[in-house]
Amino acid sequence: MSKITTPAMEKLYKKKKYNIEGVSSPGKEALKRLMRDRTAVAGLIIIIALLLVGLFAPLIAPYDYQVQDYSAVLQGPSSAHWFGTDGTGRDIFSRCVYGARYSLPIGIMCVAVGLIIGGILGVIAAYFGGKTDNVIMRFIDIIQAIPSTLLCIALVAILGNGVVQLIIAVAAGSIQGMTKSCRAAVLMVKNSEYVSSSKSIGVSNLMIMLRHLVPNAVGIIVINAANSVSESILTISALSYIGIGLTSPTPEWGAILSEGKTYISVAPHTVLFPGLVIAITVLAFNLFGNGLRDALDPRLK
């Protein structure tokens, strides 16, 4: 028997179909909430601006960051040198601009490495539980008993100076927090019905973790990652400041601070402007991270 439809029924069907298609996805709703948060948007704009500054550093910087001009040693801010010059006559503004090529990417890479390793350990610990969970988490507890900065200092001392060594050291200090946050996020969805259904039809453990657990826990993971970038940048700057991170002539922000501390009493601008750049960057990531947290999970607001 053929299905009978009337023009009124077709009109109603089209209206219902349009409404269904017009429903926003959770991702779109989170994006709308994020865009309504002015402080988060301001933080995101600053982050994008800093990334662009690092990308186009040769076009923005008025001087070569390595060129020394001994006729312009420790000059204060002026139209010729916006941030002044350092103890060897190098332009501090140019060095801060080029520093965005080091501090930001290294900070992001440290978080990415820590997130990959910590995420894998956290997901495995939460999903399998039992002895696997105990072994992984007790190992993490032992590492966490060592202060992260002290752990970074020890690893840099063992591995030596360099970008790769610095990334390994700082990432090692962030693995513990990443592992625990990923584990907690997965535990919240581990016992869901769709996970049980997947197990009942023989879906492999790996596919369950990749298809169901990680996507449903990604919100908390992203929030922790965004907030961890600022901590990584501060750690990198601190290591360079005490002389065991990146060293001159590399224009890393912490290294610029370390070079300027000798002249702080006679030329405070040598530490003022690099310090402000670090503070603004960390503030931007914190604002964006807090806004991202509120957008992905309004219940935490």
Image (tube, helix red, strand yellow):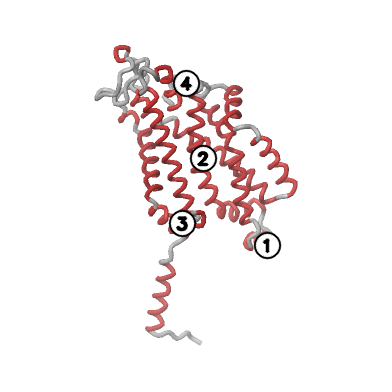
What's under tag 2, amino acid-wise?
Answer: Ser
Q: CA distance from mark 3 to mark 4?
A: 42 Å
Callout 2–callout 3 Cβ contact below 8 Å: no
Q: Which residue is mark 4?
A: 247
Q: Residue furthest top?
A: 70
Q: Which residue is mark 3?
A: 27
Above or below, 153 relative to 284: above
Q: CA distance from mark 2 to mark 4?
A: 23 Å
Above or below, 81 relative to 212: above
| Residue at the image point whose x is 62% and y is 50% from the top | 184
What's under tag 1, amino acid-wise?
Answer: Ile
Which callout, 3 or 4, points to the residue nearer the camera? 4
What's under tag 3, amino acid-wise?
Answer: Gly
Callout 1: 10 Å neighbours few (<14), some, many (20+)? Answer: few
| Residue at the image point whose x is 39% and y is 18% from the top | 265
Q: CA distance from mark 1 to mark 4?
A: 57 Å
Q: Give coordinates of residue 252: x percent, y percent.
A: 44, 26
Which callout, 2 or 4, points to the residue nearer the camera? 2
Q: Secondary structure at mark 3?
A: helix
Callout 4: 10 Å neighbours few (<14), some, many (20+)? Answer: many
Which callout, 2 or 1, points to the residue nearer the camera? 2
Callout 2: 10 Å neighbours few (<14), some, many (20+)? Answer: many
The image's mark for residue 201 is 1
Q: Which residue is mark 2?
A: 228
Callout 3–callout 4 Cβ contact below 8 Å: no
In this view, the residue in front, 95 or 274, is: 274
Which callout, 2 or 3, points to the residue nearer the camera? 2
